[in-house]
């Protein structure tokens, strides 16, 4: 028996490996839209007819985050500690990325004189990390990537951060209300999260209405928020859940049988969730778990570096462009982890996190991306 509750121990899972796969999938998916069209398209999206590598990477990130962030609150049982740990996880890498964007990438690629570049308010607006993380304000620099196919975004994946923050708020509010202490309470919390997802609040007139479900993120056929709520459910029912390779294979075969029916997409997402959790918990992959969690850095810096390659050589095919970008993306992610993310997380955990033993719950990783 290897229930999910046991796999949540720090050395009992492959969640860092799942996040690494997810980050690589996002980078690979972006390669099709950043480079000039070379006659090829995302083969996964072609085969399925709805989502591709990038979308599945984002979905996996949100599901892992929903499970591990819920575990974090349950372990801390403290709103201030939870908020501090969430800030420590999501903000430092963004702050570091904004500095790299302004002082490295901008001067190298702007078409403006440096004096004019640094005198522009648009340059310094990228230091407003609050707007980036909470208000969905992306990075854009004057004179940078003006000829790129995906102009003017410096880091398009930033659009997911405000969504992640709203999901954190759902965990915080339901946790403070005492709903995350048992499986049925966590189920109710996830249901409330889905209700919040289905409702739209329009400011400044405070008009409340249902979400327009015909509007989906660009290039996606679904939304990331429900996957976060699935992650919450997975944590709530961790003692009752166990994942097997044959089960993942069986669900995929069921999807293949019904792939031409109206139920194909829900069946695939079911197989996807089960398969990701099997990868994240199977002992067969323990040896491949990376020692360092570069996934967030790859997620943030991947698009930036790919934009740089596209600016220099826009007509490279997407595979060659990705191979050229890969070592630079990995280098940026490693530097971010080594000198920004890990030091802040270590400092914060040592001073703020409660001892897991005092709560009687298993230790779980608290490095969920975004």
Image (cartoon, rainbow, N blue to C red):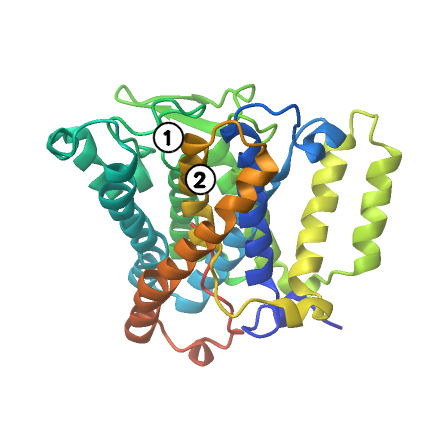
Q: Is residue 144 left or right of residue 233?
A: left
Quarter containing the N terminus? bottom right
Q: Which mark is residue 171?
A: none
Judge by depth and name the residue closer to the eye, 184 or 220.
220
The spot of residue 158 in percent (x, y) is 39, 39
User: Dot 1 lies on which element?
Assistant: loop
Q: Earlier in the sequence, mark 1 or mark 2?
A: 1
- Looking at the image, how many numbered discs can be counted on the residues? 2
Q: Is residue 26 visible?
A: no
CA separation, marks 1 and 2?
A: 9 Å
Residue at 72%, 35% (x, y): give it. 266
The spot of residue 356 in percent (x, y) is 45, 76
User: Dot 2 lies on which element?
Assistant: helix
Among all residues in the image, which is located at the extreme right? 257
Relative to residue 311, is residue 82 depicted above or below?
A: below
Can you identify the residue that label 1 sits on? 153
Relative to residue 49, is residue 103 depicted above or below?
A: below
Judge by depth and name the residue closer to the eye, 2 or 149.
149
Residue 244 lies in what quarter of the image?
A: bottom right
Residue at 25%, 21% (x, y): give it. 204
Q: Is residue 330 left or right of residue 241?
A: left
Residue at 69%, 59% (x, y): give it. 279
Can you identify the residue that label 2 sits on? 303
Q: Is residue 334 visible?
A: yes
Residue 124 lies in what quarter of the image?
A: top left
The spot of residue 142 in percent (x, y) is 24, 27
Among all residues in the image, which is located at the extreme bottom? 357
Question: Label 1: how many residues lie within 10 Å, few (<14), some (14-19) or many (20+)?
Answer: many
Q: Is residue 282 left or right of residue 137?
A: right
The spot of residue 66 in percent (x, y) is 51, 51
Question: Label 2: how many residues lie within 10 Å, few (<14), some (14-19) or many (20+)?
Answer: many
The answer to whether mark 1 and mark 2 are in CB contact below 8 A is yes
């Amino acid at each position: 028996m290897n229930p999910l509750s046991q796999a949540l121990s720090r050395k009992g899972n492959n969640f860092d490996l799942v996040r690494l796969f997810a980050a690589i999938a996002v980078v690979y998916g972006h390669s099709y839209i950043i480079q000039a069209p070379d006659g090829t398209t995302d083969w996964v999206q072609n085969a399925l007819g709805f989502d591709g590598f990038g979308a599945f990477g984002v979905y996996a990130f949100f599901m892992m985050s929903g499970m591990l962030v819920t575990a974090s609150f349950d372990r801390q049982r403290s709103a201030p500690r939870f908020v501090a740990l969430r800030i420590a996880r999501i903000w430092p890498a963004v702050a570091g990325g904004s500095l790299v964007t302004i002082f490295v990438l901008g001067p190298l690629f702007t078409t403006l004189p440096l004096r004019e570049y640094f005198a522009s308010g648009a340059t310094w607006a990228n230091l407003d990390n609050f707007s980036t993380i909470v208000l969905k304000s992306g990075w854009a620099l004057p004179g940078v990537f003006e000829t790129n196919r995906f102009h003017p975004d410096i880091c398009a994946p930033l659009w997911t951060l405000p969504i992640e923050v709203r999901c954190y708020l759902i965990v915080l509010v339901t946790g403070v209300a005492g709903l995350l202490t048992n499986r049925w309470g966590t189920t109710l919390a996830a249901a409330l999260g889905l209700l919040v997802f289905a409702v739209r609040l329009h400011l400044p007139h405070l008009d409340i209405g249902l979400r327009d479900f015909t509007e989906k993120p660009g290039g996606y056929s679904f939304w990331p928020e429900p996957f976060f709520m699935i992650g919450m459910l997975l944590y709530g029912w961790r003692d009752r859940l166990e994942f097997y390779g044959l089960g993942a294979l069986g669900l995929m075969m069921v999807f293949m049988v019904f792939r031409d029916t109206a139920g194909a997409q829900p069946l695939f997402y079911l197989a996807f969730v089960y398969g990701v959790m099997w990868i994240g918990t199977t002992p067969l992959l323990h040896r491949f778990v990376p020692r360092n969690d570069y996934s967030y850095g790859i997620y943030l810096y991947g698009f930036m570096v790919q934009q740089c390659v596209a600016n220099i050589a826009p007509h490279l095919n997407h595979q060659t462009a990705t191979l050229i970008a890969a070592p630079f993306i990995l280098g940026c992610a490693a530097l971010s982890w080594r000198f920004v993310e890990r030091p802040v997380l270590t400092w914060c955990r040592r001073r703020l996190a409660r001892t897991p033993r005092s709560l009687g719950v298993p230790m779980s990783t608290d490095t969920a991306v975004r």
